[in-house]
Image: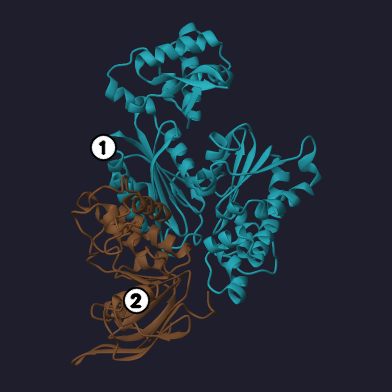
Chain colours: A cyan, B brown
Amino acid sequence: MPVAGSQSSLREANRAKIVDAVKEHGGLTQVELTGATGLSPATVSTIVKELVGAGFVEVRNTVRSGRRAQLVTLAHRVGLVAGVVVGHRHLRVAVADVTHEVIAEQTLPLPADHRSDTSLDRAALLVVDLLERVGVGMDELLAIGIGLPAPVDSSTGQVSVRGILRGWDGVPVAQVLEKRLARPVFVDNDANLGALAESTVGAARPYHHAIYVRASHGVGSGIVLSGRVHRGLGGTAGEIGHVQVDPAGRICVCGSRGCLDTVVGGAALLEPLRTSHGNVTLRDVVALAADGDPGCRQIVADAGAAIGSVVAGLATALNPECVVVGGELAETGDILLGPIRDALRRRSLLNQLTPLEIVPAALGQQAELVGAIVLALQSTDVFETADDGLGPMPELPAAMQKGTP
Amino acid sequence: MTGRTPLLALRQISKYFGAVEALVGVDLEVHAHEVVALVGDNAAGKSTLAKVVAGALTPDSGLIEIDGQPVSISSPSAANRLGIASVFQDLAVCENLDVTANVFLGQELRTTAGMLADGRMESETRRLLRHLTVRIPSVRTPLRHLSGGQRQAVAIARTLIGNPRIVVLDEPTAALSVAQTAEVLTHIERLRDLGLGVILISHNLNDVRAVSDRIEVLRHGRNNGSFPATASHESILAAITGAGSGLL
């Protein structure tokens, strides 16, 4: 163990900085690396050379702003990760390499109130099938990230509030999948994953403080403070779907009265359309609203106003630099975003220095899936695994093995 | 989407095979942009009803309406002319022919000189597969090289030739892996998005509840309950097995 402050410990720290930056962004040019790490171009160049020699990263020629550049990525043989997102009506599974590049993807429609045992079984089978599809063995899978549409206690990996996701209470999601796939599994809430993805590779990438709002069958949000997702004690941070908006409203699945979800959740959105449109699904409403159907536009716009007033409160408390809006409803674009923007514009504290940015998710419907992939990557120790395959790495220091927590 | 004239309506359909009551006074409505699932035990009459719609069987009594107009579906080609396309359990695809030839089997496009219009058929096949978001590398691959799910996709793509309005799928996910099931269910969602009415016959309640708008239960050749897709697994199962009143 090198002495703190010594030259070798400094070099180790610099290496860790570079590897973490590459890991975080998937791929960066050497020039971008100097910007991301604050190291000098000469140091970056030397360390990248060392890492290439050790087989941890690959360098290939690329073009940035019309000039030739050297793109640094983690070496592909380091392995793949899988992302799984369990939705209310769809299961999405993808495998990606360490640059967050999705290599294969599959969506499975799910029944309403699907059972945890069936859905997790199918998720495991889909992961195996996708690996087969890209011609990669199980041994190259590093980890699996999985997102659930409910608050998750990150210490146990279980749904932390009973009743919100029927049939999933007390299910040890990570253990069930770990047993099937024999790989580490990391569980988080879907909106947190969306926030993680958008702040790592999406629309919130330039900002330190951001809120990601996910409007789908339910409404949730993920909070990014100083570049990190804030989950709270029990993983319920950002659960704006359960903020009270109507003290005399309906009882929510969580047991409280008048939650935002009772006003803009899937069932609440579809109910008023029953007379005029009959039985429609959330997907229909999104498609019809985009096509200009007045009734569906009204439903989505009203939902935007209701969500906007809650997000305005959250944003006033947190003072973010930007609000990213994702989820199925965001596919309607300004029909949803317009009213949210209006609600946020009215709050004077939010727009003191510059107007608060409200943008659609850059990753669109992929946000949660990419988030699950980012979670799996950040939670795994890429180096330990690489060590197994590449033999001894005497030069590679312990400081690098910390990775991101 | 209720309140409009159904695309297809079957009223009081009965079909007997000697002493066997295959269908007794069965009603069924299918609207555009709707997936209606037919579920039931073995010999509940699901496939018989599908064959009546497809024109393979003629009912002994009852009325069939399309867009509110009474019609008679006397043969599969009559069904085709009325805009009804079907995929049966055996798929009826040719192993030795490529994807394009299978899609256009029996309804090949010809040039003005009477030759096969291969180029046109290939580009049309590509367009259809893209519409259904089917993952098949080449339309020139012989069917024997494709997986079960991909064959099912080819069979579904074939139904779209001639712009049908109703598609009947008999057990499309039977004997498929989870990944292939995922593909086929996604294709069914696409058919619905394209504005077609879909009749889906399946044993697998999980698959049925995932993509259907409405679930119709048949029991011993009779209607035994109609459920929205959000109805619980248990209530549908009760109607199938006869444990409940069917009016939950």
Picture quarter containing residue A241?
A: bottom right
Q: Amino acid at mark 2?
A: Ala
Residues indicated by labels 2 and 1 sit on the same polypeptide chain = no
- The x, y position of residue B153, in whole percent, is 32, 57
Task: Please state which of residues A390 and B75 is positioned toward the viewer in this rendering.
Answer: B75
Residue beneath the point at 27% across and 77% down? B47
Task: Please state which of residues B41 and B88 is positioned toward the viewer in this rendering.
Answer: B88
* A182 up-or-down from A249: above or below: above
- The x, y position of residue B95, in whole percent, is 19, 56
Secondary structure of the residue carrying numbered label 1: loop
Using a 10 Å C-alpha cutoff, classify the residue at mark 2 as few (fewer than 14 neighbours), some (14 to 19) or many (20 or more).
many
From the image, which quarter does the C terminus of chain B lie in?
bottom left
Q: Chain ID for label 1?
A: A
Q: Amino acid at mark 1?
A: Gly
Residue where numbered disc 2 is placed: B79
Is there a contact, CB below 8 Å, between mark 2 and mark 1?
A: no
Alpha-carbon span between mark 2 and mark 1: 48 Å
* A28 up-or-down from A289: above or below: above
* B147 up-or-down from A145: above or below: below
Picture quarter containing residue A51?
A: top left
Residue where numbered disc 1 is placed: A137
Q: Is residue A379 left or right of residue A286?
A: left
Q: Is residue B151 left or right of residue A241?
A: left
- The x, y position of residue A133, in whole percent, is 29, 42
Pair 2/1: label in front: 2
Seen as rendered, the residue at the extreme front is B113
- The x, y position of residue A349, in whole percent, is 79, 42
